[in-house]
Amino acid sequence: MFKRSLSLFWGLLVVLALALSACGPKPSTPTAAATEVPTAAPQKTEAPTAAPQKYVTSSGFECPQPEPRLEVTSKELNLFVWTEYIPTEWKECFSMVYGVKINHDEYSSNEEMYAKLEKGGTNYDLVQPTDYIVSLMIQKGMLQKLDKSKLFFLENMLPPFMNQPFDPNNEYTVPYQAGTDAIVYNAKTVQTPPQKWADLWNPEYAGRMVFLDDSRVIIGMTLLTLGYDVNTRDPNQLQQAKEKLKQLIPNVKLFDSDSPKTALIAGDVDLGVTWTGEAYLAQQEVPEITYVYPEEGAILWQDNWAIPTGAPHPDAAYAWLNYTMQGNMFWLMLRDFPYINPNKAALEFAKANHPDIYEPYINSPITNPPLEVFEKGHRITDVGEALPLYDQIWTEVKSGQ
């Protein structure tokens, strides 16, 4: 069982829990020399430099300037990213500022993304693999090493999210967002609140649940109810998990990794398994929605940016990374996709300029979890030769076999 250590997450929680403020330098008092009238003849001055062109998106968002602006000759950028995970302003601003057309494809699971890249025939410049699939993609030669001399935002990334075991020294990836998988329920409609993964087998919940369509998460939580490692490779333990999961799957009304919050908000379901950000957004719409960290431990994860091997527009990819990861751009993730944000500059910018968004975010136990959540949590990792068995179990239990 892979668990986060106390020291690994302490830095994160300190940053998220304490006030993030920036104090500008005080103006200095002019010296006598500075106020003296020069006696020399005035020098010829250069014509003032033209102010940078301003760009405004369809939503009225004024695009900040790149810091710094990179040289880009490519005319296109091909993104392959998670569903509902990119602020619209990013794409509009980048296209206007750099004159680059963005082609945007989406996926709903790491397995879907991996399979498409493995088959070849794709020309993606950036992908967003989650931690456990990164090591496999590196092993298969599917990701190229990053040129860190072209990454100017790394100092803004909080240390707990860097140098992870799936990519030591961040040779291939940079953090995007992190979060948890846990239980969500509507306190107004659910009479017996679930507190453990094992509670989801309660017949009272039959036909009322939405689950993520994620084999590793759902099989993993089932393994935890049996006292096993979420990353077990033991065929006997996996067979037991399959038999138990077969009892649960018929009770699930909906599998949704695109927007599980939608059914919760609409009242089509009353509880289920979802991610940090989806639970937080659902709670903003329906205050009775509650997020529970199961007694057996939540699932911990981290999504990352990576450049696939053979990416056709690497110059545009580096420009995109630097531009969107600026604090005055990445804060939009708190507004649109409020997961655990690893970007200190973004948190500081939001606190100073958008306290109406920052304060609810930083004070929520969903987006700023208690330390014990990380101490008890479980991280999914690559299971090597056992992966086909996980895939087989998932296919069979969902089809009723």
Image: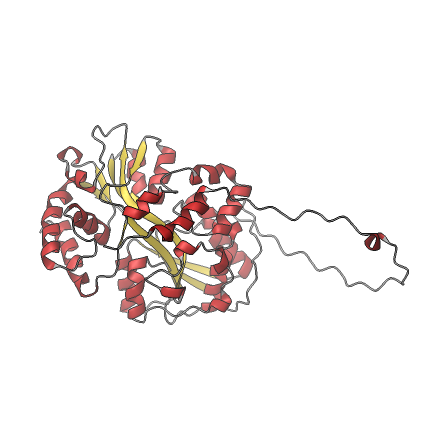
Figure quadrant of residue 281: top left
**What's the residue at 29%, 57% (across, down)?**
110
Is the image coloured rainbow, by chain, by secondary structure, or in one colour? secondary structure
Question: Foreground: 131 or 399?
Answer: 131
On the image, the x and y values in percent for residue 25 come to 65, 49
**What's the residue at 28%, 62% (across, down)?**
114
Question: Foreground: 228 or 375?
Answer: 375
On the image, the x and y values in percent for residue 319 come to 50, 63
Figure quadrant of residue 288: top left
- Picture layout, residue 380 above or below residue 117: above
**What's the residue at 50%, 68% (across, down)?**
149
On the image, the x and y values in percent for residue 157 come to 46, 55
In the orientation shown, which residue stands out farthest toward the front?
Answer: 7
Determine whether, in the image, residue 185 is placed left or right of residue 50.
left
Whether residue 40 can be seen here: yes
Whether residue 75 can be seen here: no
Determine whether, in the image, residue 142 is placed left or right of residue 77.
left
**What's the residue at 23%, 36% (across, down)?**
195
Count of marks placed on residues: 0
On the image, the x and y values in percent for residue 226 come to 14, 47
